[in-house]
Structure formats: C-alpha cells, structure tokens
Image (cartoon, rainbow, N blue to C red):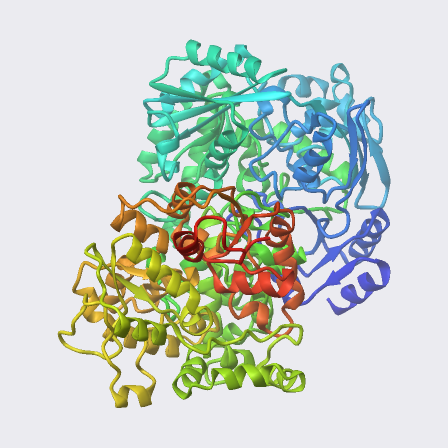
Amino acid sequence: MANLEAELRGAVRGEVGFDATSRALVTMDASNYRRVPRGVVAPVDADDVAAVLAVCREHGVPVVARGGGTSIAGQATGTGVVLDFTRHMNRLVTLDPEARTAVVQPGLVLDRLQEAAAAHGLRFGPDPSTHSRCTLGGMIGNNSCGSHSVAWGTTADSVRELDVVTARGRRLRLGQDWAGAPDGLRELMDGELALLRTGFPELPRRISGYALDALMPERGADVARSFCGSEGTLGVLTEAVVRLVEAPRARALAVLGYADESAAAEAAAGLLPFGPLTVEGMAADLVPSAAALPRGRAWLFVETGGESAGEARARAEAIVRAADVVDALVVTDPAGQRALWRIREDASGTATRMPDGSEAWPGWEDCAVPPARLGAYLRDFRALLGAHGLRGTPYGHFGDGCIHVRIDFDLLTGPGIARFRRFSEELAELVVAHGGSLSGEHGDGQARAELLPKMYGQEMVGLFERVKGVWDPDGLLNPGMLVRPAPLDAGLRFSVLPREPVDVAFGYPADGGDFSAAVRRCVGVAKCRTASVSGSAVMCPSFRATGAEEHSTRGRARLLHEMLAGEVVTDGWRSTEVRDALDLCLSCKGCRSDCPVEVDMATYKAEFLHHHYEGRRRPAAHHSMGRLPEWLRVVARTRTAALVNALTAVRPLARAAKRLGGIAPEREIPRLATRTFSRWWERRREERTPTGRGDLVVLWPDTFTEHLSPAVGQAAVRVLEAAGLRVALPPTVRLAKPPVGDGRTVALDPLSLLRGRGRVCCGLTYVSTGQLDRARAVMRRTLDLMEPVLETDAPVVVLEPSCAAALRTDVPELLHDDPRAARLAAKILTFAETLERHAPDWTPPRVDRPVAGQTHCHQHAVLGDAADRRLRQAALLSGELSGGCCGLAGNFGFEKGHYEVSTACAEEQLLPSVRHAPDGTVVMADGFSCRTQLEQLAGVRGRHLAEVLAAALEEGAGNDPEGER
C-alpha cells in the first residue's frame, strides 16, 4: 500500500489521500453497503485519470469513480482506489445556447448546470431529487432520471458524446455510429443482434443491466448511450457533451388528492396524454404535516408548463377536471410550488423512518413496471411485504411506473438478513412478472445485480460479461457491480457496528438510547452537501465554507460510523480524525431540522468531546468560554465589570488574554454590562409595584441577557407588561414553597452567594464544549431552583434562542433520568410565542419599517419562528430574515483557528442581507452571537425583537435610530 501511495503521488497532480480520514469518508454511499478503499485520489484532469489507471493496473488494484456519493445500490464504494471528481473536475466547460448543448466535467453538480442554463431559458432535462449535490458523472453512470422524465426522459436521452479513459489507458470519444467503440465491441454485437432485439423489455424506466440495445443499427449504434448506466464498470468518464431542453416560461403545479396510493397509481397513466412535465406520487405516511396539501391519503404532483402563467394554469386545471380526485389544488406561485416540491424531494430521507420511528432501508428503492400496470403491481407488492412481515411506504415517479420505497429490513441479525435475501429474490420475480425492471433509476450496483438473471436470463447476463471483458479485460473497474456481482447480502454497513449499546451521556430518545442507531441515521442522501441554501435553511454552514466532505454532516457521520467500527478509525473516542472533523462543526443544529432524517451533529459533537477529553487536558477555549457563566458571575459578584472592560481595552492586555484563553486574535472581546439585568430588575422592583393582571410569566435571565445584553431583558419586561402580563424572575435559592408570582425574586442567602449557585443556567456553554458532567450538575441545580415554577401554570420565557433550544432539547436529553427536565422543557416559550399564547388580544405597536437580519439557527432548527413571523407582521415589520448561520455560533467564532470559517458563514447570507438593505431598515437578530457578529464584521447594531417593540411603544414607530442600517 505504501508503494501504491508513493507511485500515485508521483504520477498525479491532484490530491492523494491514504490517511484514515480520506478513506473513512468514502467507505459508504447512500446504500446499505460498506467497502474500505485503499486510498482516494482527486484527479485534476484526464491525464491524472489515465495516470491513476496506469498505476493501479500495474498493482492490480481496482478503481471506482465517485461523484456525489448518493448512489443507493452500492456502486460508489470500492476496495481499491476511489476517484473523487467533485474537488477539481467539476467545471462547466462550455455552454452553447444556440446548439442547446453543454460540455461538462463529471464532478459538476447538476444545479450548477441548471443555473447556467436557466440564464438562456434552457435546462438539463433529468433532475433527481438530489439535484443540489449529485454530479453529472454520477448521473451518467447510473442513467439517472428524476421527476421530469415523463417529459424529457433519462440522462441517456440527454447525452450526445462522452470522453472516457479505459482501464488500459485508451482515450475514446463515444458517440453514434460506433464512434469510440473499443476494439471487438462491434463484432460482438453484430453476432448477437437477435438476442438484442428480443431480450430487452420496453419500458420508460429500464435502467438495469447494460443498455446494449442502444448499439443496434436501427437505434444508431450509439456507443455513448450504451455507456450510460454502466456504473463505472466499462470506463472512466472525463468529459461529456449533453443536450439541453427549452424550459417552460411558466409552470403550474396541480396536487391531486386520492383515497389511497393504489388509486393514485391507477390514475397516473391516464394523465400522460395531457403532456405533463411530472406525475409524481406519494402517500400520507411520508408527509410530516398534510396541512399544505389537498384532502386525501395519497397525492399526485402533476406539473404543467406554458408560455404564460395563464397557459400553464389552464393545462393544470384541465388535468384536475379530467382526474377523478378526492380534492385538488393548483399552485402557480413559484414559492408555493417550491414548498410543495420540498415535501416530495425530502421523501428519500423521510422514508428512512417508519411512522413509529423505527428504521427503514434502501435496497429495493426503484423498481419500475409499465405505468399501466403500476396499480396492480403496488397491490402485489404490498401483499409481498405483508407475507414477510415487512413495512414500507412507496412513492416516486408514478407516471413512469417507477417506485421508490424504504423497507424496515432487519439488517443487524442473521435471521433478518436471511429474510432480506428471500424478500429480494421474491420481489425480483414479482417485478419481472409485471414486465418490469429491477432498477428504474438508481442502477443495479450490488443490491440487484445478483438478480439480473431473473430479469434477463443467463444468456443475456453472459453477454453482459463478455461486453465487460471487451471494455475492461482485467476487471479493474468497479468489480462486483453489474457483472460477476458480489452477493446482495454481503458487506452490509451495519455489520461492523457494536452490537451492544455504547455508554453515552445523552439519552438519544428518538434512537432508543443507542448511539450507534443515532449515527446510522445518516443514510447518505447528502442534503448537507449543497453549495447554497435558500429561505430559512441552515444546514451545513461549515461545508459551504470549506467545500470539504469531512466538514459536512454526512462526512462527520461517516467518521463517527468508522470510529464505532474500529477498522479505519482505530482510536475510538480518542480519535484525532473525528476530533478534527468536528472542530469546524458550528453546533448550529441546522441538521436537526434540515436533514431529512434529523441527524443531530451538534449533540454528537458534544458527546464526542465529552469522551475525547475525559481525564485529559482540555483546550483553553473550553475553560475560557465553556465556563463563561462562572466567570461572568464572579465579575458580577465583585462588581468589576468596568475594570474588566478597561483592561480588555488595552491592546497588549487584550492580546495576552486572548492568547491565554484560546480566543482568535482577530476578535474583539465583548464589553460587559456594568449593571446586570437582575440588578436592574431588583432596583425597578423597589421603585414600582407590578400592576399587570394577566397571566404570570417567568422571564429567564440567561447568561447573555444577564451580563452582556441587559437592554434586551429590560425591553422584554416593558413589552410583556404592556401586553398585560405579570413578569417574575426564577427563584435564586431552593425553597419548598417559595412565592412565585409576586413579581419578585427571592433574595440570595450568603451561603448560596459564596457557592455561586444563585442563578439558573441552561448549561449551553458546557454542552457545546462537551463538558457534560459539569453541564448535568448545572442543569440539576437549575431544576432544583425551578421546582416551584414547575408547580405553576406559568410559562418560562427565554429571550436568547440558543438557551431556549438548550432548555427544550439538551436538558431533557442529557437529564433523561430526571422527569423535571421534561416538565421544564414543556414550559419553554420564546418571546413571540409568549405574547401569542398568553396575550392573544394584545396589539403590538405599528413599527411600519422593513427588516433585515437573520433568524437564529437554533430557533430555525429547534424552536421554529412562525410566531415571530406573525408578530413581526402584526407590527408592520415587512420583509424576511435570512437563513443560514451567522458564523459566530457561541464560542465557535471566538475560538482560535475558526475566524476564517466564521466570517465565511456570515458572508453567505447575514452580511449581504444587511449591506443590501435600504436605508431605514431595522436590523434584527435575536441571538447575542448574531448581534456580536454584525457589530464586529459590519459595524451594525442588531436588535432583538423585544427591543424593537419596546422602542416603538416608548418613542413611537421609526424614531429610534439605533439598529438601523
């Protein structure tokens, strides 16, 4: 292996990675399979590809081409050298609008091509649901399709010419009329014309096997087309000429509701004569909330196009009239259409969990039958599932007869795996009995190649093997796929995971307390690998900043998987590979909501850091910022905030403090409030008697509001009281029956003061730095203090979104053995939720200004911002806040070595939204981190929603210049 690595490094200009991280990241794709490669090469050009093949041929080491790694049948994994085309060979070479063609490299992500083509009114026809991260090379390798295949066909229908390098180093340009055919291919095909003409079923979605029928003379002897769907087993693609189609000027989306999936399936074929762009189907099992959909238990998403919105809508309405539906909805608004399409596109991830939360897996993801037989096939399919005691929810391309489904196979035990094999064999026979194809989109890979004789017969499969021998006589390219396949039940990725639950700190309630089950949530659909996000989405800011797989949620999950396996990553919790990959995780929690399977990398990171540093010296930042509440309480007790501010204003002292505390030298140390929020509250209580007669609410004095932004707390009190609510703060000592509800805090006793136990704390900073033992102690102390509040009906209002998220999720998940934690979590409300639920008749002041800024990433991921949107709307605060993450993310952006990534995250959405805002815009940011990032990078003061409303109440809308751009 050392010789192989050395020779590759000497032969190629691209990166060569034989280290544990490089290998661990590509052991899996989006399938059930796992293979450990020897190394990874990121080629720069076709010369690099040829050089890799030459070295590997000499060593007898197989080569696997890999794009986005979203293949579902195992064909993007291998035991030899993996070629990663996404790093360098990812360009759109040329685009010719007149010829409607584009020249692309294999690592180009489909959405980048679509964006460039859209400027000319064009598009690439096929569009899998992974369009934001799948590559053109992977699409050609799998002959991918997508939802618009009823209009524009498969990838093979859009390919003109292909440049490939064969395993023996020949460079061929494939096209029609035998162009680029390797020696011996034409002669072999000429001798088998009878078999070619009778051996392939006629289907719109026949992807299984080699497309040898494309080589018949009556079909143009199209070598490029026949190469599509060969899964990297015949040659390595280095460039492609693809055909573009004219995009409709306008679109409409008809969503048709049916009583069940069979009714939807039987209706699909009848809609094809209307010329729709899509006929997609899914059932209620896959929809988290059907509120946005018409009545029914299953739906068809039928898209139509036209030269105008009216024409597109008229076509959609014609389909609705012709369809026998329970209910229907026609949407022409682009934003509304995108929202509905996201429901369908997320199904590939949503389907990995059954309604009861149990796991479901690919393997029989995309069989296809003639569209007219789809209803009958689905009934038989359901019966077969029932006969094996399995469950699955079909969805997919009903107009093409192609069905996706994840099934709750038991792939962890011997009997379960045996049942997986029996079911696979019987389902293959069922598909063939309906005249179908084992694969209708994602390829055969390892999952189905073993069963190809059931579909094609031994003679045709033998011809496939002979064709493979012509192209790749040494069997170098992606062995075990399509021909001479590996068994469908071998190399399952779950077999290497621990059989007994791993000892962990968090409860992982959604995964039965099993950390291995939490890690295997990631099925590789790679939604985290998108280059940009739209709307309020967050995941995954570190990947967008670096573009490195190890900084994606999927990459980190893969490393954790390999850590548990212990074969590639061998140091367990002490792994430096996992530590380094998690180092740039912002703990934004975006994956908790944006990942279709709700991977929670922030929690996994905290868990890992807890074990990694157990009994070891921690980084300085863990002490300086992880224990921030302690240091700030010391400053408050000693009343030295002014002194600290003065000292940190002296540059040499600030530099020394930052160096000692592991803080990025580029950062300014935030100024402390000289009077804490609680002291303001006590003084105010002494000066006036609370007069509110409404509901009692307990306002949480989080660390940031208490010591750094007391103005936010003061503003919140003013607004809550203006809404008629009675405001109290949490108790500061533990009492059996303390007074809660008189608007006062309980006085501190001296002993509590000395022990520093006088204030509640959510434990956020300890969790984010993995100091989980300390976090639990802080949380339990907080629960002790909050016991009297838990006995009341009063909600707990939390102004800082990150603290609210910690109280709702981290506290009950870390203290899963303490029922008080769940009771406290159920009481947590945001500022806007409190006003909406407990002062529903209150009318906020009219601010009547546009807004810019950012929704806090934890609010998006855990809390939701619907109440905030409604409150802003009621106050006439117009416009939308951006998504993404500010990049500061608590301690992350302050830690040494994180500044560049932190600023890159801010530059993605937050800073541009503020720079481009018109004069008079109110800059809003509810999180202290977001406000600090705005101040330090843009020189703008952002304001909490409470501050904006308080200013409007006191001074009149528009008269407060602070926080304006």
Q: Which x, y percent locates residue 380?
A: 37, 26
Looking at the image, residue 730 lies above or below residue 249 = below
Q: Quadrant of residue 407?
A: top left
Looking at the image, residue 152 lies above or below residue 525 = above
Q: Quadrant of residue 308?
A: top right
The tally of labels here is: 0
Q: Is residue 619 visible?
A: no
Residue at horizontal 53 percent and vertical 10 percent from the top: 273
Q: Which x, y percent locates residue 309?
A: 57, 18
**Which of 98 and 947 lies nearest the eye of the viewer?**
947
Q: Which x, y percent locates residue 601?
A: 48, 60
Q: Which x, y percent locates residue 12?
A: 83, 58
181 relative to 687 in the view: left or right: right
Residue at horizontal 75 percent and vertical 14 percent from the top: 218
Looking at the image, residue 940 lies above or below residue 775 = above
939 relative to 954 in the view: left or right: right
- Specify the quadrant that holds the N terminus: bottom right
327 relative to 601 in the view: left or right: left
Residue at horizontal 63 percent and vertical 42 percent from the top: 134
**Which of 560 and 456 lies nearest the eye of the viewer?**
560
Q: Is residue 339 visible?
A: yes
**Which of 252 and 54 lies nearest the eye of the viewer?**
252
